[in-house]
Image: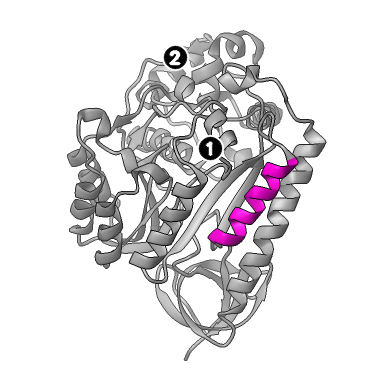
Amino acid sequence: MNKVFGMISLGCDKNRVDGERLLGEVRRHGCPITDDIEQAQVLIVNTCAFLGAARKEAIEAVLEGNAYRGGKLEKIVVAGCLPEKFIDELYPALTEGDVFLGVSDCSELFPALERAYAGERVNAVRTGCEGAERVVTTPPHLKYLKIADGCSNHCTYCLIPSIRGKYRSYPMQQLIDEAKGLGDTHELVLVAQDTTRYGVDTGENLFVPLLKKLSELDNICHIRLLYCYPEVVTDGLIAEVRDNPKIVKYFDIPLQHSEDRVLKLMGRRGTRESYLQLIQKLRREIPGIALRSTFIAGFPTETEEEVEGLKDFLRRARFENCGFFAYSREEGTPAYKLKGQIPARTKQRRVRALYGVQEAIADEYLASFAGKTVRVVCDEVDFERGCFVGRTYFQAYGVDGVTYFTAPHATTGEEYDVVIERTEAENLIGHAKE
């Protein structure tokens, strides 16, 4: 097959890696890849199914893609979490899809397409394998490394265990080889549903040994950690982040709430006090550490007093970056059956109120950089603004703010000393030193 392939990839960075493996199959078969959907003969829609809104977005993407059939488009492949979880409902209903693949079915892409071109609609979910070659879709100097799949935490609001199964760590040597194969990489971002439990499913936590091995690779300059669950941020991990010059001094720790009663209902193992103690320890042990977290507002039975408690927690924790989401009631999760479901309007109001608290904290933090010089990696050029776009160590790609800076010239993937002039929302504005 010498077809031109295009992709629409939705959802998280872990899903992005799955999409890159699908594109790796395309490249392995010698087929061209385009980022212009109008030129694609085969369109892959790599879907997310974590929330109802994500499922709606995925189906809309398939329907919008189907409109291109009047041009060059011949086949649509629906891949990822949506068919993995909902194939029994999806396959008969979404007739716009020609091929359906799950999260680990990249090896079945071409056999399934051959059947589709012979006239079949193909359900190939749960028939393939993981660990294929990848086509990197991020800026060339920044790459993700997914170190595990699935989750065994079983938070009561989350569909991930039923979509991706139990937590399973990828073999360490496979990960080392994959990281080597990514070539020169300024920033390697480690992702999984829970990075800090790497190896636990095999009998021993091997996250720190993995970090040490990855740090030995000459092609890797920096390593950033995402999705670190608080109860597994051990003293050993803290020491490794503190002492290893390759690891970015940044922790992404999804807490989801601060109040003990809500945390227990969520199936979370931490408490307000244990979280505050961890934050205090991180700031004490790793000077200048940047902390990021995420929180859910409007969980069933959450009271206004508990929302105020979460606001107070934010003021005490003073995260450099934070995200807030309205609770989404997902059928098949234990929380779906809880009484005391909160109206959507109330949930959105609470999200806005929490963002208001965090924005004041972040504004004060960013304002402290005015007149100072920070180290920034250049990610791209913003032609509309007439400047370069980069990030400091406390700005993770795609989830935090950025640093806009002017310079006579700059190269993506290179670092520059940038003098900060002012802030703009969650972003820094400055100019590179000559």
Q: Which residue lies furthest to the right in this view?
A: 345
Quadrant where the N terminus lies?
Answer: top left
Mark number for residue 6?
1
Q: Which of 88 and 194 is in front in this view?
A: 194
Badge 2 element:
loop
Mark number for residue 124?
2
Magenta part of the protein: which range? 304-317
Residue 134 appears in view = yes
Q: Main secondary structure of the magenta part?
A: helix
- Picture quarter containing residue 20? top left
Q: Residue 358: where, in percent of width, then height?
A: 65, 59
Q: Which of 340 and 186 is in front in this view?
A: 340
Mark number for residue 410?
none
Residue occupying the point 39% across, 28% down: 150
Question: Is 126 on the left or on the right of 9, as rendered?
Answer: left
Q: Which of marks 2 and 1 is nearer the N terminus?
A: 1
